[in-house]
Amino acid sequence: EVQLVQSGAEVKKPGESLRISCKGSGYSFTTYWIGWVRQLPGKGLEWMGIIYPGDSDTRYSPSFQGQVTISADKSISTAYLQWSSLKASDTAMYYCAKAPHHCTNGVCYDFWGQGTLVTVSS
Amino acid sequence: DIQMTQSPSSLSASVGDGVTITCQASQDIRNYLNWYQQKPGKAPKLLIYDASNLETGVPSRFSGSGSGTHFTFTISSLQPEDIATYYCQQYDNVPELTFGGGTKVEIK
C-alpha cells in the first residue's frame, strides 16, 4: 500500500528554522516525483515545488524560490521541506504528494500525505 | 504566470443533479489541466488528469473536458459523498504550476 506519512504539527516563532518530513512507503521512492503544496488557513492550494528523489532534481515555483528548500534522502525514503527563517505568513498546512508515472515531470499527484500544520507565532 | 479562474466559487445542488464547474486559463494551456477534490480536513484527491482522463478508481460520474483556455468538470449525478471543494490545476508552464481558486459544492 502506497503511503506518505508526514511529520507532526509544529509551533514556531518568527525567525526560527524548521524542517518537516514526508516518508514514502509501499512504492519505489526513488522513481517518482514528490511535490509540496501549501494551503493557507481557509484558502486554496498553492504549488511550491517538486523533487525527484532518484537524483535530487528539484524545481521551485517562482513564488517559493529562495523561501524554502526541498530535499530528499533516498536512503530513508524521505522528502523534506525546510525554512531557514520562518515568518508568520508561513502559517499553513503543508502537503507532500507523489506523482504517478503517467504525469511526467511531477505535474499531478495521486497519493498525498496527511498534511503538516505549521503555526508561526510570537 | 498563468491565472486559472474557476466558476462558480460555490454551488448548491440536489442529490442526483448534474453539476458543472468551469476553469478558464489566462492563456492557452493545451490540455495540461488536472482536477482535484478536497473534502474538509483532508488532503486533495486527483480525479481527472490531462483535462479528460479519469484517474484509476474514480467513479465514472466524474468527467472533464476542454482544451486551450476553457475547461469543464462535470458530476453527472451528485452524491452526498461528493460534498467537497474542487480545484483545477494547470501544468503548461513547469515549474509554474497553478491552481484555480476552488469551487465549494454543497447539497441543497
Image (tube, coloured by chain):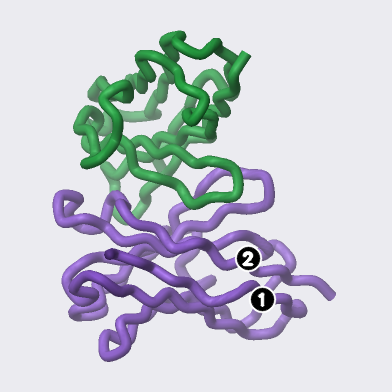
Chain colours: A purple, B green
Residue B71 as seen in the image, left or right of residue A80: left
A108 vs A115, nearest the viewer: A115
Quarter of the image that includes the N terminus of chain A: bottom left
Residue A62 in the image: above or below residue B69: below
Which subunit holds the residue at mark 2? A
Q: Secondary structure at mark 1?
A: strand
B64 vs A28, nearest the viewer: A28
Residue B28 as seen in the image, left or right of residue A36: left
Residue B104 position, x and y percent, is 57, 28
Tell me the distance, in whole angstroms, between the alpha carbons under discs 1 and 2. Answer: 6 Å
Residue A7 position, x and y percent, is 53, 76
Q: Residue at x 69, y 84 (%)?
A: A16
Residue density around tag 1, few if under 14, some if 14–19, many if 20 or more, within 10 Å:
some
Residue B68 position, x and y percent, is 25, 24
Residue B54 in the image: above or below residue A26: above
Q: Amino acid at mark 2?
A: Leu
Q: Residue at x 27, y 85 (%)?
A: A74
Residue A9 as seen in the image, left or right of residue A69: right
Q: Amino acid at mark 1?
A: Glu
Quarter of the image that includes the C terminus of chain A: bottom right
Residue A26 position, x and y percent, is 25, 71
Which label sits on residue A10? 1
Residue A25 in which image quadrant: bottom left
Q: Residue under circle 2?
A: A117
Residue B95 in which image quadrant: bottom left
Residue A118 in which image quadrant: bottom right
Q: Residue at x 49, y 41 (%)?
A: B38
Sequence-wise, the earlier of marks 1 and 2 is 1
